[in-house]
C-alpha cells in the first residue's frame, strides 16, 4: 500500500503520548522526521520511533522533499507561523486544535492552504470514536427522531504548573473552553449534523490562580432548533470525571459515558421508541436499549489513516480544518457572551 511520508512538528507532547504511536500502526503512513525545540529531544524521539531525520528547526524539516505531510502539535501560539510555512512548502497538514489563537489566525492559515493547493485537517480525533460514529449514523437515519437536546462534557485536573503555555492566554488563546469544550462543541455539531446559531456562556477562574478559565458552561442553540449544553473543567479530579455525551430526540436517546477522551473506550446506551403516543404513566422502566456493536481501536491511527486516504485517494476530509475554525468562532462568541452577560448570535 502507498504510504504518506510524515514529518512531526512539536513531537514531544501529545505527538509522543498518542499520535506518533497511533501513526506507527496506520497502514498508509510512514514517520520520516521529527522536530523538537532542541536537538537532544528531537534525536531521542527520532531514535525512539525509528524515524529517518531529527530537526530542531521546523524550517529545516520543511525543506526535506521526502516529507509529504506534517502533523503540527506545537503550542497553539506556534501554529500560524508553522502551518503557513508548511503550506508554502507544499506539505499537507494535520493541525492540532485550536487551529490558531483566534478565528482570524485560523482563516489566514486556511487561505494560504487554498492558495498553495494543500489539504488541511484538524485534530478532532474524537470524531473517530466508534460509538460517536454510530451515534452520527443513527441520527442521520432518523432513528432518534428530531434532535432536541444534547450535552457533552470533558474535564481534567489541571493545577498551576510553572511554564505551562495553556495557562497563559497569549500562548493558548484561552483555558478549558478553548482546550476541551472545543472537542465537545465539535462533536455535537458533527454528530447531529447541525451548526451552532446562538450561545450563552459562563466562564470563570474559580479554583486556580492562572489567568485562563478553569470552568466553563455554555448553552448553544443549533440551526435545527436543538439546545446543547457543553461543560468543561480544569478543576474536577480525573478520577471523578464522567465525560458524558448525551443526545436526545423526539423518538429516542443515545448516552455515552467515558467516550470523550484520548483512549477509545466507555459505554453507550441507545433507546429507540416506536410510538409517539401520550403515556399518562410516563413509563421509563420498560425499555430495552438497542444493541450497539463496535470494536475499540486506536482513534489516532484512524485519524491518520483517514487523512492519509484524503491525501492519497482524494476522499473527503473527515475533520476539515474549516470546521475547527467555525468551532473557534463559537468559542469567541462564548467569551463575548461571558464578557457582556448576553446571548450572542453567530
Ligand atoms: N487531540 C488531542 O487529543 C490533543 C490532546 C492534547 C493536546 N492537543 C493539542 O496539541 C497541541 C500541543 O499540546 P500538548 O499537550 O502536546 O502540549 P505539550 O506542551 O505537552 O507539547 C508541545 C510540544 O511542542 C514543543 N514545542 C514548544 N515550542 C515549539 C516550537 N516553537 N516548535 C515546535 N515545537 C515546539 C514542546 O517542546 C513540546 O514537546 C495543542 O494544540 C493542543 O491543544 C490535542
Image (cartoon, helix red, strand yellow):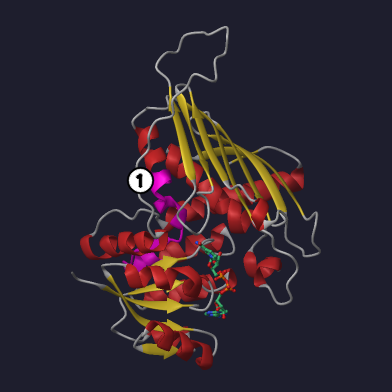
The residue positioned 64% from the left and 63% from the top of the image is: 173
Q: In the rendered view, would you say 243 is above or below 198?
A: below
In the rendered image, residue 119 lying in the magenta stretch gets the answer yes
On the question of residue 92 being in view, the answer is no
Residue 343 can be seen in this image = yes
Residue at horizontal 41%, vertical 66%? 94
The answer to which image quadrant residue 344 occupies is top right
> Number of callouts in the render?
1
**For the view shown, which residue lies furthest in the bottom direction?**
40
At a point 29% along the width and 84% down the height, the residue shown is 65
Q: Quadrant of the N terminus?
A: bottom left
Q: Residues within 10 Å of mark 1 (few under 14, many from 20)?
A: few
Query: Where 304 falls versus 205 (above or below)?
Result: below
> Is 130 one of the magenta-colored residues?
yes
Task: Tell me the residue that label 1 is attached to.
Answer: 294
Which element is circle 1 on?
Answer: loop
Give residue 333's position: percent from left, percent from top: 63, 47
* In-front residue for pair 130/207: 130
Left/right placement of residue 236 relative to residue 35 reads right
Q: Residue at x 47, y 89 (%)?
A: 44
Rendering coords of residue 308 (x, y %): 29, 65
User: What's drawn in magenta, residue-wise?
Assistant: 112-133
Task: Give the vertical position of 314 relative to 250 (above or below).
Answer: below
Measuring from the top left, give residue 90's x and y in whole percent.
33, 75
Which of the four quarters of the rendered structure image does ligand 1 lie in?
Answer: bottom right
The foreground one among 278 and 74 is 278
Amino acid at each position: 500500500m502507498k504510504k504518506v511520508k510524515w514529518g512531526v512538528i512539536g513531537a514531544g507532547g501529545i505527538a509522543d503520548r498518542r499520535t506518533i504511536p497511533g501513526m506507527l500502526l496506520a497502514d498508509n503512513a510512514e514517520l520520516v522526521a521529527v522536530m523538537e525545540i532542541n536537538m537532544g529531544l528531537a534525536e531521542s524521539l527520532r531514535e525512539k520511533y525509528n524515524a529517518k531525520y531529527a530537526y530542531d528547526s521546523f524550517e529545516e524539516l520543511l525543506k526535506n522533499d521526502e516529507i509529504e505531510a506534517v502533523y503540527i502539535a506545537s503550542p497553539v501560539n506556534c501554529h500560524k507561523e508553522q502551518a503557513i510555512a508548511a503550506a508554502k512548502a507544499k506539505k499537507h497538514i494535520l493541525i492540532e486544535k485550536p487551529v490558531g489563537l483566534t478565528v482570524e489566525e485560523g482563516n489566514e492559515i486556511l487561505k494560504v492552504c487554498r492558495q498553495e493547493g494543500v489539504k488541511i485537517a484538524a485534530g478532532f480525533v474524537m470524531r473517530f470514536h466508534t460509538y460517536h460514529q454510530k451515534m452520527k449514523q443513527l441520527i442521520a437515519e432518523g432513528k432518534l427522531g428530531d434532535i432536541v437536546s444534547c450535552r457533552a462534557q470533558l474535564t481534567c485536573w489541571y493545577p498551576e504548573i510553572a511554564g505551562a503555555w495553556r495557562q497563559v492566554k497569549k500562548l493558548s488563546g484561552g483555558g478549558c473552553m478553548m482546550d476541551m469544550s472545543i472537542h465537545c462543541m465539535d462533536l455535537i455539531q458533527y454528530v447531529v449534523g447541525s451548526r451552532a446559531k446562538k450561545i450563552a456562556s459562563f466562564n470563570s477562574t474559580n479554583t486556580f490562580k492562572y489567568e485562563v478559565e478553569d470552568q466553563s458552561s455554555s448553552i448553544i442553540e443549533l440551526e435545527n432548533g436543538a439546545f446543547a449544553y457543553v461543560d468543561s473543567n480544569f478543576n474536577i479530579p480525573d478520577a471523578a470525571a464522567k465525560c458524558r455525551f448525551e443526545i436526545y430526540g423526539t423518538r429516542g436517546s443515545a448516552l455515552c459515558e467515558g467516550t470523550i477522551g484520548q483512549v477509545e473506550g466507555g459505554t453507550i446506551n441507545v433507546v429507540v421508541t416506536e410510538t409517539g403516543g401520550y403515556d399518562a404513566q410516563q413509563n421509563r422502566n420498560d425499555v430495552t436499549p438497542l444493541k450497539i456493536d463496535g470494536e475499540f481501536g486506536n482513534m489516532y491511527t484512524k485519524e491518520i489513516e483517514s487523512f492519509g486516504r484524503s491525501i492519497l485517494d482524494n476522499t473527503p476530509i473527515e475533520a476539515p480544518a474549516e470546521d475547527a475554525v467555525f468551532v473557534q468562532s463559537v468559542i469567541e462568541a462564548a467569551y463575548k457572551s461571558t464578557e457582556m452577560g448576553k446571548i450572542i448570535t453567530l
